Image (spheres, grey):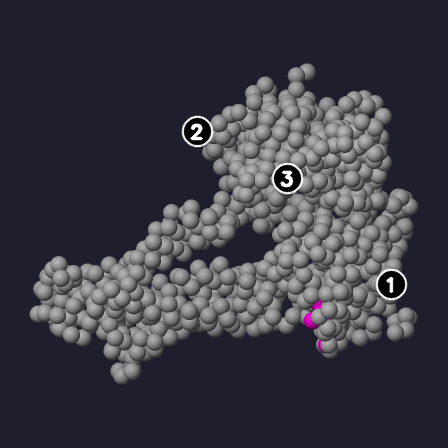
């Protein structure tokens, strides 16, 4: 099957006001298949959120494209004019569920009006009554109580419900790909579960085809993603199936990340999570050698000198020349 | 102080906001005790009243009715509030929101010496701040002249903990200290909490929505739902033999690595 | 810095700032460059503008340009003083009520609302009217400030109330700060940009209010102000004599100052309020 989204050696950098160049995404490649959920994991500052801007084709200063491509169904969206990206890519090819979604709804308007606007923005001639019918049908189909929700103002909804409504509205135009950037991190565990359930409904109902799910919570990815890419310092350091990455990580950073998670559940009290010491490297400076070497618990003397490339190990790709 | 009086004791503690039809009861008829050197977690979904209960314990809210005692004395009447806050301190959920963005970090750490009637001499204050920063793995000199927005979330959360190392209170109210930091930094924050408990033999009230986390850190759990404490007990009792449906709900909702979680009904 | 850049990029701010600068220059530059005398007759009554007397003379034959410059200075003085009084009063009452909450807030809000429904212009007219002698510029400014603080109090109260429940205020409390310390160090800094906007708006309305009172003949009796000039022009038949130079320039200046300040205010709101910054 041809990939629905192809990211090819993507490099993105920020130019600060003082002319400093920060290489936030440094050579990321992956493919997203139809029907797939790809998880992207990593600490804050690893380039996850910058990568999202790239995937959406939204490169605005101070963020710039250094090189590489993002292709959706063969079309390189990074080389389209911004107006074209807004018109034909966003919402239709790809939609984002933002981190701060809770504040992204205009508080003075009803959910119904906000949703109607989204449809009208892409189809000016649409019949008002048909739109209402369509909204009802869609909200019901993804498991929201259409009448109650549509007639509410954003402030009347609890945080978890608001996030689900944001998801409902941002997928009204049946985007092929949904990018979910920490969609549930600000919610309590019960609301988080409801959000994930809703995302699954979108896939199962065929409303969206594939999803990229970005989070720092590995246990969550275990249930959500089919494949997982672990990012560190702007690069993918390991990419493979969920089973491979979570239970049998081969890259030292993946293992450290997994070891730092509180697998907080009854019966696991004896296992002690270990925090990763130190901080990720400063991407404003040129780096050579393995980027994780200074924090790596199993670093060898040659690690700081040796630039790392992704290579295949045990059926997945790993950026560590010692991994086996 | 004799250890047989509990650290906190609440009898029919209620806190309501608003009047008449708009009255909302945030904490409803809570009765509990928290012993000295105990770690108790207040667990529940957002809006269950756990944060208001924490504010009551911190003396930032006053009870509407019922009693809340600290070492046998009603909190609201224990005279100088500063004496109370020398004993009972807090860390908050969002460290950026907890610091004033207009002042340097160091000056804000120093501000906690206001709680003492006689402030230590300048040199000693600086020394204690440096010690506390080292205790949470921050390099004191790197923070000189820095403002909150110049640091990462994990560093900011550790600064809130550094405040506790400076003040060395007897009780710590930790209101969701890990929910705004990266999953991978959580272990570190919890480590510092444990270190505080060990070094200062502190009583800790831990507020969280994550029952798994609560299980991991506490001696006892209080499960809250709509302002009421619906269940209290040891972590093993509560998690393995839950009596309340709300507890069961919370347990089901944690995404565990080892257990199925969300089922995909319509999966192709 | 970022804020300043945002401001400079907003056309409204530039227009407002330039207009304000121009009026300030007009008020303070000419006295340094030439001799302006508002008490010596420069010619006959209502002489039209010439190259030597840019704006002609008034009904007494005084130089209109000199009168205008000095009137502008008085108007600006009244405006700024009234603005300061209204902002300070409103801020004190608003912040205290908003931060304290409870019955204190209820009482202060009730007081504010009471003052709000009293038609301030009528009160001003009555007050000024009842004071025949000693109606100085400063006194008028204080009157204006004391009757227009209400809406700044309301605006500030809402902001302070939302800051009250922030974590940094809670932290300040358990650091042992009292009410005064919290208000000054932990609430006011967050309101500074907002207060600046309030001040600008209060200044504009102060200038307008003074003009209205003075035009009605109830202004300061011993000084020239823009409203005063209008009053003199009306009373001495400038309109029917076709002496447009006696009433048009002060009118234009009042409009320009008020316009500049209002534009400044709205453009700043667009920058300070991130939700409007889009």
> What stretch of residues is rendered in magenta?
B112-117
Position in image of residue B181 (x %, y %): 72, 48
> Alpha-carbon neighbours of circle 3 within 10 Å: few (<14), some, or many (≥20)?
some
Q: CA distance from mark 3 to mark 1?
A: 43 Å
Q: Is residue B9 visible?
A: yes
Query: Residue under circle 1?
Result: B201
Instruction: Classify the position of the C terminus of chain A by image quarter.
Output: top right
Distance between the alpha carbons at the discs numbered 1 and 2: 69 Å
Is residue B37 shown above or below A63? below
Q: Residues within 10 Å of mark 2 (few under 14, many from 20)?
A: few
Quarter occupied by residue A239:
top right
**Secondary-structure class at tag 2:** loop
x and y percent of residue B162 in the render? 75, 59
Q: Both on one chain, marks 1 and 2?
A: no
Among numbered discs 2 and 3, the one appearing first in the sequence:
2
Decide whether the magenta segment is chiefly helix, strand or loop: helix
Mark 1 element type: loop
Rendered location of residue A191, percent (x, y): 70, 44
Task: Please identify the quarter of the rendering in which residue C34 is found.
Answer: bottom left
Are the residues at dot 2 and dot 3 in contact (C-beta closer than 8 Å)? Answer: no
Q: Is residue C158 left or right of residue B136?
A: left
Q: Mark 3, chain letter?
A: A
For the point 48% across and 27% down, which residue is it? A81
Does the magenta-highlighted stretch encompass residue B87? no
Where residue A125 is drawn, which disc sits there?
Answer: 2
């Amino acid at each position: 099957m041809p990939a629905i989204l192809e990211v090819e050696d993507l490099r993105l950098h920020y130019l600060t006001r003082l002319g400093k160049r920060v290489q936030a995404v440094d050579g990321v490649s992956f493919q997203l298949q139809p029907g797939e959920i790809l998880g992207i994991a990593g600490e804050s500052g690893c380039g996850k959120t910058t990568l999202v801007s790239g995937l959406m084709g939204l490169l605005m200063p101070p963020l710039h494209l250094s090189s590489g491509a993002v292709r959706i169904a063969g079309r390189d969206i990074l080389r389209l004019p911004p107006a074209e990206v807004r018109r034909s890519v966003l919402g239709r090819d790809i939609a984002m569920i933002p981190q701060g979604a809770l504040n992204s709804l205009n508080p003075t308007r009803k959910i119904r009006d906000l949703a109607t606007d989204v449809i009208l923005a892409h189809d000016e001639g649409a019949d008002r009554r048909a739109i209402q019918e369509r909204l009802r049908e869609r909200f019901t189909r993804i498991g929201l109580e259409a009448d109650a929700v549509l007639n509410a103002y954003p402030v009347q909804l609890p945080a978890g419900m608001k996030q689900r409504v944001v998801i409902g509205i941002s997928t009204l135009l049946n985007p092929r790909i949904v990018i979910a950037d920490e969609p549930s991190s600000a919610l309590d565990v019960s609301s988080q579960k409801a959000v994930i359930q809703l995302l699954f409904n979108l896939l199962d109902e065929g409303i969206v085809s594939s999803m990229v799910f970005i989070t720092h919570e590995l246990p969550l990815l275990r249930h959500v993603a089919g494949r997982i890419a672990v990012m560190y310092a702007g690069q993918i350091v390991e990419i493979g199936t969920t089973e491979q990455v979570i239970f049998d990580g081969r890259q030292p950073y993946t293992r450290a990340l997994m070891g730092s998670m509180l697998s907080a559940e009854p019966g696991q009290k004896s296992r002690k999570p270990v925090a990763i010491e130190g901080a990720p490297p400063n991407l404003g400076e040129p780096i050579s050698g393995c980027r994780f070497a200074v924090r790596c618990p199993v670093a060898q003397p040659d690690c700081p000198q040796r630039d790392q490339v992704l290579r295949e190990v045990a059926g997945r790709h790993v950026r560590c020349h010692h991994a086996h | 102080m004799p250890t047989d009086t509990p650290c906190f004791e609440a009898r029919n503690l209620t806190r309501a906001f608003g009047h008449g039809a708009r009255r909302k009861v945030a904490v409803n008829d809570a009765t509990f005790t928290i012993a000295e050197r105990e770690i108790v977690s207040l667990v529940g979904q957002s809006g269950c009243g756990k944060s208001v209960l924490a504010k009551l314990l911190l003396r930032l809210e006053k009870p509407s009715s019922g009693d809340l005692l600290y070492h046998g004395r009603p909190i609201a009447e224990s005279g100088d509030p500063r004496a109370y806050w020398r004993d009972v301190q807090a860390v908050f959920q969002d460290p950026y929101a907890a610091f004033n963005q207009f002042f340097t970090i160091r000056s804000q750490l120093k501000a906690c010496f206001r709680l003492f009637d006689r402030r230590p001499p300048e040199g000693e204050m600086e020394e204690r701040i440096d010690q506390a920063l080292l205790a949470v793995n921050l390099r004191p000199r790197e923070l000189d002249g820095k403002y909150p927005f110049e640091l990462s979330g994990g560093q900011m959360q550790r600064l809130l903990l550094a405040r506790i190392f400076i003040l060395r209170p007897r009780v710590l109210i930790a209101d969701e200290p890990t929910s705004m930091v990266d999953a991978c930094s959580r272990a570190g924050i919890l480590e510092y909490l444990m270190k505080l408990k060990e070094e200062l033999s502190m009583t800790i009230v831990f507020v969280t929505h994550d029952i798994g986390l609560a299980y991991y850190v506490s001696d006892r759990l209080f499960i809250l739902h709509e302002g009421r404490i619906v269940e209290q007990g040891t972590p093993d009792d509560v998690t393995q033999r839950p009596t309340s449906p709300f507890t069961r709900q919370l347990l089901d909702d944690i995404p565990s690595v080892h257990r199925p979680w969300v089922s995909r009904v319509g999966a192709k | 810095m970022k804020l300043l850049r945002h401001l400079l990029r907003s056309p409204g701010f530039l227009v407002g700032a330039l207009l304000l600068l121009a009026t300030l220059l007009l008020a303070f530059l000419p006295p340094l460059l030439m001799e302006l005398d508002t008490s010596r007759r420069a010619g006959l009554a209502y002489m039209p503008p010439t190259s030597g007397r840019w704006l002609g003379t008034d009904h007494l034959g005084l130089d209109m340009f000199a009168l205008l410059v000095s009137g502008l200075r008085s108007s600006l003085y009244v405006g700024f003083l009234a603005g300061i009084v209204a902002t300070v009063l409103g801020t004190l009452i608003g912040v205290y009520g908003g931060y304290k909450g409870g019955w204190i807030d209820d009482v202060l809000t009730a007081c504010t609302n009471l003052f709000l429904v009293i038609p301030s212009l009528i009160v001003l007219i009555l007050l000024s009217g009842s004071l025949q002698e000693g109606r100085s510029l400063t006194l008028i400014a204080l009157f204006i400030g004391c009757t227009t603080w209400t809406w700044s109090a309301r605006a500030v109260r809402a902001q302070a109330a939302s800051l009250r429940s922030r974590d940094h205020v809670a932290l300040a409390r358990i650091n042992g700060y009292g009410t005064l310390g919290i208000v000054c160090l932990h609430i006011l800094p967050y309101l500074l940009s907002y207060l600046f906007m309030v001040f600008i708006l209060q200044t504009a309305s102060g200038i307008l209010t003074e003009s209205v009172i003075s035009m009605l003949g109830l202004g300061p009796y011993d000084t020239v102000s823009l409203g005063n000039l209008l009053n003199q022009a009306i009373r001495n038949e400038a309109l029917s004599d076709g002496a447009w130079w006696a009433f048009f320039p002060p009118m234009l200046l009042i409009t320009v100052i008020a316009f500049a300040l209002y534009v400044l205010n709205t453009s700043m709101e667009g920058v300070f309020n991130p939700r409007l910054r889009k």
